[in-house]
Amino acid sequence: MRRYFAVFATDKPHMREVRERVRPSHRAYLRSAASHGVFVRLGGPTLAPHCDAMNGTLLVIEADGIGDVMAFVGNDPYMQAGLFERVEVRPWDWSLGNPEHRV
């Protein structure tokens, strides 16, 4: 049964140039998710509280299992470039606001 997973990734300090350089490849990779057996349902950068600089990534991915998500995230160009200091993947129950399940 397919389910949702929240991916929280935090950039290493002083990696703005890497993020900006790799971002087009990262975005193209996210758009190709279906060919990897997962679906990115939501995604975007997280922002620093005082200056709105990008400092991480938040994704909601639909997949058969956490292993599929881990493999997909592991091949992300941001991961390959060493951008992230920490990545956490958690199973997530998308209830409020899910267009497939009106509340």
Image (tube, rainbow, N blue to C red):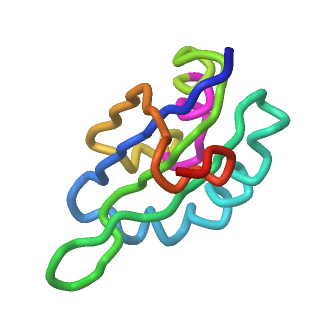
Residue farthest to the left, as pictured: 50
| In this rendering, position of residue 48 left or right of residue 91 | left
| In this rendering, position of residue 63 left or right of residue 66 | right
Taking 90 as reference, is 100 above or below it?
A: below
Which quadrant of the figure has residue 91? top left
Q: Nearer the viewer, residue 4 or 44?
A: 4
Residue 10 placement (x, y as % from top left): 29, 50
- Secondary structure that dominates the magenta span: helix
As for residue 80 lying within the magenta part, the answer is: no
Which quadrant of the figure has residue 47? bottom left
Residue 79 placement (x, y as % from top left): 48, 41
Q: Which residues are magenta?
A: 71-78
Residue drawn where x is 65% and y is 46% of the image: 40
The N terminus sits in image quarter: top right
Residue drawn where x is 30% and y is 78% of the image: 53
Residue 24 placement (x, y as % from top left): 66, 66
Q: Nearer the viewer, residue 63 or 21?
A: 63
Taking 68 as reference, is 92 above or below it?
A: below
Residue drawn where x is 40% and y is 30% of the image: 89
As for residue 74 lying within the magenta part, the answer is: yes
Which quadrant of the figure has residue 39? top right
